[in-house]
Image (tube, rainbow, N blue to C red):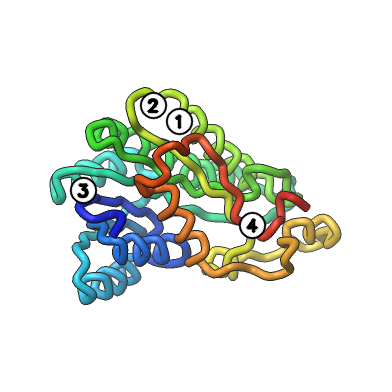
Amino acid sequence: MKFKDKVAFVTGAASGIGRATAVRLAAEGAQLYLVDIDEAGLATLSAEIAGQGGEVAAQRLDVADAGACREAIDAVVARFGRLDVLCNIAGIAAANHLSDVTDEQWQRMVNINLGGVFYLCQAAMPHLEKSSGNIVNMASSAGLVGQAYNVAYCATKGGVVMMTKAMAMEFASKGVRVNAICPGGIKTPLVSSFSIPEGADMNLFMRMVPLTGSMAEPETVADVVAFLAADSSSYITGVALPVDGGQVVG
């Protein structure tokens, strides 16, 4: 029960890595505040966790809305009295030729993948300073190496990596740890809906495939979230940890 008496805020909780993280932290005793744009998915997960004796609250949240992010952080502290762990997992992905990326697509990617992380970290930090808490941001292997047809996604996930490192430096002396995880191919709805642009060079595209030749389950990443968020990782901050089956190595 590594998270007994601790409060965790998890974005993107209705499916994929976010859902697996919520289940894992609940099993370790955390009190959970779950957010997503998928209200039905949130309701199902909340009922599942509550049915197993977990303490959970949930609300719809569009992480691209700065004001709503601040209100959600206020809500978790009002509900549970504290905040110990912020898990920024919500995100979107899309592959396009550079020439096909529209202004709207670019801005949406930036607002969700990068803006949402910034807004929540900024709002949560005063509370995390009080609890000596920590942040786990979900970046990507695309934030560590270039990937063809993924300009917008690489840009935002690379931004998450550097945002993580900057905050880790700024708040280390204040007792707040900030880390990032960089998944590769994971079996999530985000990946299953991923499509290859027409006319793409498959030799370039295949460089995104892990050396293992297979994708991992969301629970694999959730295990790493729990590892980094736990007090036993108190000497780890500022890392961008690949969980990618060797994709970055290759």
Among numbered discs 2 and 3, the one appearing first in the sequence: 3
Identified by mark 2, the residue type is Phe
User: For numbered disc 2, what is the local secondary structure?
Assistant: helix
Residue 57 locus on image (x, y percent): 21, 60
Identified by mark 3, the residue type is Val
**Along the line of sight, the residue nearer the viewer: 137 or 58:** 137
Tag 1 residue: 168
Q: Is residue 187 above or below residue 66?
A: below
Tag 3 residue: 76
The answer to whether the residues at label 1 and label 2 have Cβ atoms under 8 Å apart is yes
User: For numbered disc 3, what is the local secondary structure?
Assistant: helix
Label 2 environment density (alpha carbons within 10 Å; few <14, some 14–19, many ≥20): some
Instruction: Tell me the CA gap for discs 1 and 2.
Output: 5 Å
Among numbered discs 4 and 1, the one appearing first in the sequence: 1
Q: Residue at x 39, y 42 (%)?
A: 135
Tag 4 residue: 244
Residue 243 locus on image (x, y percent): 59, 55
Camera-near label (3 vs 1) is 1
Instruction: Tell me the CA gap for discs 3 and 1.
Output: 23 Å
Among numbered discs 2 and 4, the one appearing first in the sequence: 2
Camera-near label (3 vs 4) is 4
User: For numbered disc 1, what is the local secondary structure?
Assistant: helix
Residue 8 locus on image (x, y percent): 29, 51
Q: Is residue 167 above or below residue 64?
A: above
Camera-near label (2 vs 3) is 2
Instruction: Tell me the CA gap for discs 2 and 3.
Output: 21 Å
Among numbered discs 3 and 1, the one appearing first in the sequence: 3
Q: Residue at x 23, y 57 (%)?
A: 31
- From the image, which quarter does the N terminus lie in? bottom left
Tag 2 residue: 171
Identified by mark 4, the residue type is Asp
